[in-house]
Image: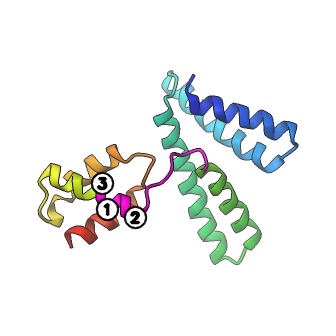
Amino acid sequence: MSELKKRLQEDLKQAMREKDQFKRDTIRFLMSAIKQVEVDERKELTDEDIQKIIQKSIKQREDAAGQYKEAGRMDLYEKETKEAELLKSYLPKQLSDEELEIELKRIIEEVGATSIKDMGKIMGKATKELAGRADGKRINAIVRKILG
């Protein structure tokens, strides 16, 4: 069993002991998403696979939060935002913009990119190497800044 899955199970038990309904429900939802993928693909997921599921869940919550905010539903906006923050705690530490820029400059040099036309080569390598530490949107924006 992956380390991340063990950590989630331990945190779920702790949340149940502490009667923390919010944390319990958020982790249960995530665990059911993980279980669904394991059943569908008939395999034990690695930490990287679980991180992808967490990132997808975070993105869904951030999108929903934005829609709730536009609709003036601050109660639901706060709930979604809080869930996204809790899920982020299970991902590796995100790179700062400065650290990300240094990594991307190295990747750009490695693939021999010279213009924005090489974005596909850069993004392919960068998203693989920086998985879990930076999302695609940030990577894309900083690559455009560097090559722009």
Look at mark 2 in the image and give the residue it sits on.
Answer: 97
Circle 3 residues within 10 Å: few <14, some 14–19, many ≥20: some
Q: Are marks 2 and 3 in contact (CB under 8 Å)?
A: no
**Nearer-N-terminus badge (2/3):** 2
Q: In what element is the residue under mark 3? A: helix
* Percent position of residue 134, x then y: 42, 54
Q: Residue at x 63, y 66 (%)?
A: 65
What number of labels is visible? 3
Reading the image, the residue beneath label 3 is: 103
Task: Say how the picture is coloured.
Answer: rainbow
Q: Assign a secondary structure to mark 2.
A: helix
Return the residue at label 1. 101
Q: Amino acid at mark 2?
A: Asp
Element type where label 1 sits in the image: helix
Q: Amino acid at mark 1?
A: Glu
Quadrant location of the C terminus in the rendered image: bottom left
Magenta stretch in the rendered image: 89-102
